């Protein structure tokens, strides 16, 4: 889910596809961090990761009217768009270097490691599946703290629960996710 009042991604996608900028902003705020970090991992530097993140959400905005959300989260679809945008950026940069005869920038990968992308994709899918299996409160806690960067108390206030509930549940969620990561690597 990706809204302050716990509206689901599917409803937000329908609203955003219908032109609601508020719904799209809500989705953006919910998923900009994971998309950025995926992009950063693939392109290797903050400036390109920021541009790829923006390109990802621009493509998403344009394609929302045709999207039929499969599942509870928009993140797998955004991650796919992000990977394509990263691949395009890396190809474009390599082509530009070849045409200009410029010295290769060592911070930009010269090729895309397809095997690593497949592994990263499987890991992201495993994590998303694990998160999807959580209860509604745990998913909300994970979204607020892990995705949106809320502090424990801020998340507790947002959800109307005690600070300790957020801290303890997030600790259990992280332990579950570490197990998933270990099993997937």
Image (cartoon, rainbow, N blue to C red):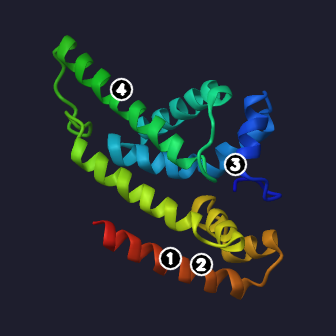
Residues tagged 3 and 4 counted as in contact (Cβ below 8 A): no
> Which image quadrant for residue 132?
bottom right
Looking at the picture, tell me which residue is in the foreground, 20 or 132.
132
Q: Residue 9: which disc?
A: 3
Q: Position of residue 86 (x, y in %)?
A: 38, 34
Mark 3 or 2: the one toward you? 3
Task: Looking at the image, tell me whether mark 3 or mark 1 is earlier in sequence order.
Answer: 3
Looking at the image, tell me whether mark 4 or mark 1 is earlier in sequence order. Answer: 4
On screen, residue 123 versus residue 151, left or right, reads: left
Quadrant of the rendered image containing residue 57: top right
Of tags 3 and 1, the one toward the viewer is 3
The residue under label 4 is: 88
What separation in Å lies between label 4 and label 1 (alpha carbons)? 33 Å
Q: Badge 4 local density, few (<14 within 10 Å), some, or many (20+)? A: few
Lower sequence index among marks 3 and 4: 3
- Residue 146 position, x and y percent, is 57, 65
Closest to the observer: 147 or 136? 136
Gap in angstroms between the C-alphas marked 3 and 2? 21 Å
- Measured in 3D between alpha carbons, the distance from the residue under mark 2 to the one under mark 4, in whole angstroms, is 36 Å
| Residue 163, placed above or below residue 77 | below
Dots 1 and 2: beta carbons under 8 Å?
Answer: yes
* Residue 174 image label: 1
Q: Is residue 93 visible?
A: yes
Q: Residue 43, how many percent across, how many down?
A: 34, 40
Badge 2 or badge 4: first in the primary sequence: 4
For the question of whether residue 26 can be seen, the reply is: no
Quickly name the residue at label 2: 170
At which x and y percent is residue 62? 62, 24
């Amino acid at each position: 889910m990706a809204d302050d009042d716990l509206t689901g991604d599917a409803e937000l996608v329908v609203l955003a596809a219908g032109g609601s900028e508020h719904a799209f902003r809500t989705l953006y705020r919910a998923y900009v961090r994971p998309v950025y970090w995926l992009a950063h991992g693939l392109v290797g530097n903050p400036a390109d990761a920021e541009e790829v993140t923006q390109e990802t959400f621009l493509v998403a905005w344009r394609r929302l009217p045709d999207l039929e959300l499969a599942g509870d989260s928009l993140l797998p679809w955004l991650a796919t768009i992000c990977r394509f945008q990263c691949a395009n950026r890396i190809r474009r940069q390599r082509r530009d270097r070849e045409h200009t005869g410029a010295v290769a920038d060592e911070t930009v990968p010269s090729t895309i490691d397809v095997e690593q992308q497949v592994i990263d994709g499987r890991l992201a899918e495993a994590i998303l599946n694990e998160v999807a299996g959580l209860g509604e409160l745990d998913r909300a806690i994970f979204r607020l703290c892990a995705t949106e960067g809320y502090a424990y108390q801020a998340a507790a206030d947002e959800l109307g629960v005690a600070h300790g509930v957020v801290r303890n549940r997030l600790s259990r969620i992280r332990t579950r996710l570490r197990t998933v990561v270990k099993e997937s690597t």
